[in-house]
Image (cartoon, rainbow, N blue to C red):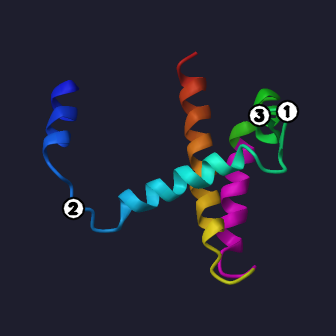
Amino acid sequence: MVEVEEALVRKEIEYKYNEDNILTELKEYIDNTYGQHYSHKNFQATEFVIDSGHGEGFCIGNIMKYAQRYGKKGGKNRSDLLKVIHYGIIALHINDTENNE
């Protein structure tokens, strides 16, 4: 694993789809969600849903919601796509947590 990581560090990747910049934007977007209105006393509503055992369905539902909303509410709203990816990341976390227990 370390050898693969070292090889990636040595080789500069030329991204075809601007992934490096999009990942930076996504991180900034996610960072900002921690201070927004749906974060209360350092807890996000999503945490309560996950703790109640409904996290996976909640995330998949939100992925569907924002994917279907894209292009309809406010035009092709970039933040809808960022939300799809963010909920996908949270769903991956739930999957990893449940499969590692």
Within 10 Å of disc 1 (Cα), the crowding (few <14, some 14-19, many 20+) is few
Q: Nearer the viewer, mark 1 or mark 2?
A: 1
Q: Disc 1 and disc 2: Cα gap in Å?
A: 41 Å
Could you tell me which secondary element the residue under label 1 belongs to? loop
Residue nearest the viewer, comparing 73 with 35: 35
Could you tell me which secondary element the residue under label 3 belongs to? helix
- Per the image, the residue denoted by label 3 is 47
User: Is 76 one of the magenta-colored residues?
Assistant: no
Q: Nearer the viewer, mark 2 or mark 3?
A: 2
* Left or right, 46 with reference to 40: left
Quadrant of the snapshot with the N terminus: top left
* Left or right, 69 with reference to 21: right
- Per the image, the residue denoted by label 2 is 14
Q: Which residues are magenta?
A: 57-73
- Residue 51 falls in which quadrant of the image? top right
Residue nearest the viewer, comparing 98 with 11: 11
Per the rendering, the mark at residue 94 is: none
The residue at 60%/25% (across/down) is 98
Within 10 Å of disc 2 (Cα), the crowding (few <14, some 14-19, many 20+) is few
Q: Position of residue 31 (x, y in %)?
A: 62, 46
